[in-house]
Amino acid sequence: MKRNVLLWVMLGFVLCSVFCLANRELVSASETGTVVTGGSDLNMRSAVGTTSPVVLTIPNGAQITVLDQAAGSDANGTWYKVSYNGVEGYVVAGYVALGNQPPSTAGPSASAVPSVVPASAVPATPSPADPSTAPQPQKVTVYRTKTTYKKISVPAKLKKQTVIQKNTSGKALFVKKKKVVLKKGKSVTIIAEKTVRGKKWFKIQFKSGGKKRKGYIKSTNVKLSVKKAAGGSVTGVKTALRVRKKPGSTAPYSKVNGRTMVLAKKQYVEVLKARTVGKKVWYQISFPYYGKTYKGYVQAKYIKLAKRRIQKKVAVTVLSEKEFEEEMTRQGFPDSYKTQLRVLHMAYPYWQFQAYKTGINWDDAVKGESKLGTNLITNAKSAAWKSKESGAYDTATGKWTVFDGSTWVAASKEAIMYYMDPRNFLTAQGIFQFELLEYQSQYQTKDGVEHILSNTPFGHAKFSYQDDVSGTEKEISYASAFCEAAKQSGVSPYHLASRSKQEVVTGASSVSSAVTGTADSYPGIFNFYNIGATSGTNPVMNGLKWASSGDTFLRPWNNRYRSIVGGAMYIGSNYINRGQNTGYLQKFNVTSNNTYNHQYMTNVEAANSEALKTRNAYSGMLDSVPLVFSIPVYENMPETNCAAPQ
C-alpha cells in the first residue's frame, strides 16, 4: 500500500514537472512586441527590478523581441526578458504590446488610465521610462501651420474683340456651331496659364449665352486688373531673374547692400499689380529675401501665374479610436498598414496620418527605381543587399561596379523593395521619413536642432560671417543658423539639420571638405547640403563648383551662413514646394512630377537614416506635437511587407 502511494506521488511529481516545463516553454517562446510608453523611452535593465542597472533605453514605438513573458515581477508588475538591437535585458511588461494587437493605452494599470488625462496628472519632469514616470497624453489644445493653395482667379478685360480658342493649337471655340467672339472690354477671369512655343496663353472663364464657359486667349489680348494677390513662379529664364525698383527696362535694379536682388527659376512670388509700360507688361511682385519681404517689378513674361500659397494656424484635436478607424478608411489606407498605425495613434494621439496615393502600380514603381545607378548602397553591405545585374557586378572578378566615390555600388532589387515599402517603417523612428517638411514654428525649436547636431562639430558651436544686409561681422550658432534658414525657406529646421548631418558630417569631430572652406580648387566656398554633388569620382568637388557659381539662392556660398540659408532656399524651392515634401519622396520620387528622377540622394538608406536623426530632435515632446505624416500607398502592393535581403 505504501509502495502504491509512493508510486502515485512520484507519478504526480513527474506529471507536474512536465506540465510546468511545457508551460514554461510556452511563456518563454519568443514573440514580437512594441514599446508603448506614451512618449518617453523605456529603460532596459540588467535584471528584474528598478534598482538594477540600465543597460540601454528603447524608444517608444520600437519593435522588440520578447524572449520570456514570465521573467519575474515586483511592485511594478510582471517583467519581460527582451532583446533589442542584439542586446538582451528586462523591461516592465505593462509597457509592451505583444504581437500585432494595438494596446488600449500605456502602463501596467491600463484599464484604470484614461486615454487623455489632465495636465496636472502628468509628472512635471518625467524621466525616461520606468512605468511610474512615463507621461500620458495631455488634454491640451495644440496647433500647427497648415499650408493650402488657392486656385488661380485673376480678373481681366479684353483689349480688343477676340475669337476665343478651344485650346492653344489655334482651334476656335464653338457654341451651337458659332464661333465664340468676345467684345473689347469684356470681363473675364484667368484660371490657368500655359506657354506654347514661347507664347503665353491664359485659360479664361467667362459668361456667354447665359452660361459659364471656358476657353483660351493669348496673354497679349487681355489687361489684368489684379485686385487680390495672386501666386506666381519665376519662369523663362536660364538661371535667375533680376528685380527692378519700378516698371520699365530703364528702371534701376533693386539692391541689398550693393548686391542686385535676383530670383531663382521656379521661385515662388506673389503678383500684386500689372502695369503696361510701352508695349510691355510688368508685374509688381512681393518675395522673401534675407528674411524680409520686398517688393519690386519684373516683366510679366518671366512670371507664370500659379496657385496662391496660404498658411494659417489650425487647432489639432485627438481622435477617438472609432474616429481614427473611420479616418484610416477615409484616407484609403490598406489593411496591411492599419495595425501599425493603430499602435502609433495610441502612443501619439496628436499625430495625423495621410495616405499619399501615388496611383502607381507597385511593380512599376520598383522597376522605375531599379534603373542602374539610381539607388546605391555601401559596398560594405553583404551580397544580398548589392545588385548583380548587368553593369553592376563583374562575374569574372567577383567585384561590384563603383558608381559614386570609392564605395557606393548598385543596391539589389530586394534592398530597393525593402526601403521602398512604407509598411517596413511605420514605427516611432521610421515614420519620420514621411513627415511633412514644412517649417512649424510652434514646436520646431533651436533646442531640437541642437539635439540633432549633438556629437558633431556643429553642436553648441558658433561661426562668424559678414552679414550681406548690414555689411557688419556677426556671430551665430549653427543651430540658430538652421532656424534662420527655416524661416527664410519655409523648410523644417530639423530636416535641414538632419540633411546636413547626413551629407557632410564624417565623425564626432570631423566634417567633409564640403564645409571646411579649404578645398584647393574652391577656397572659401561652403556647401552644407552637398547640393550639386553629382555622382562621380569626386562628388564633393562637383558640389563646391556649383556652390561657387551663379547668383541664385544667395550664391556664391562664400561663407557658412549663405550656404546654410541659401541651400535651404534651394531645397524649399526645388523639392518641398514642388511636391517632394517628405524625406521619402526626395529619395523615391513617385510624384507625378518627373517620376523616378530629380531625386536628392542616391543612397537607398538615406531617407530612413535621416528619419532617425529627426525623431531624436523631438525627444521629450513626441506625445504632444501635432506632426503630420504623408505615407505613400501603391496600387497592387504585396499582401505582406517586403522583407530585408537575407
Image: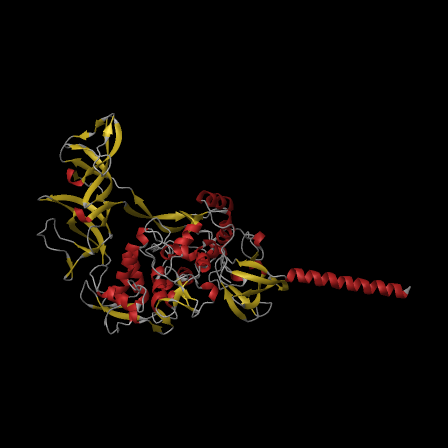
Q: Is residue 589 above or below residue 380?
A: above
Quadrant of image for the N terminus: bottom right
Quarter where residue 495 is shown: bottom left
Q: Is residue 277 left or right of residue 85?
A: left
- What is the count of numbered marks? 0
| Residue lying at 44% horizontally and 44% vertically, measured from the top left | 331
Using the rendered image of the protein, determine whether residue 352 is visible from the camera's viewpoint.
Answer: no
Q: Is residue 158 above or below residue 262?
A: above
* Furthest residue toward front: 396
Near-viewer residue (502 or 619) = 502
Quarter where residue 515 is shown: bottom left
Near-viewer residue (119 or 455) = 455
Q: Is residue 389 left or right of residue 159?
A: right
**Residue 569 locus on image (x, y percent):** 27, 58
Using the rendered image of the protein, determine whether residue 133 is visible from the camera's viewpoint.
Answer: yes
Near-viewer residue (645 or 561) = 645
| Residue lying at 40% horizontally and 59% vertically, measured from the top left | 607
**Residue 115 locus on image (x, y percent):** 51, 51
**Residue 233 locus on image (x, y percent):** 24, 49
**Residue 469 locus on image (x, y percent):** 19, 62
* Furthest residue toward right: 1
Q: Is residue 139 left or right of residue 280?
A: right
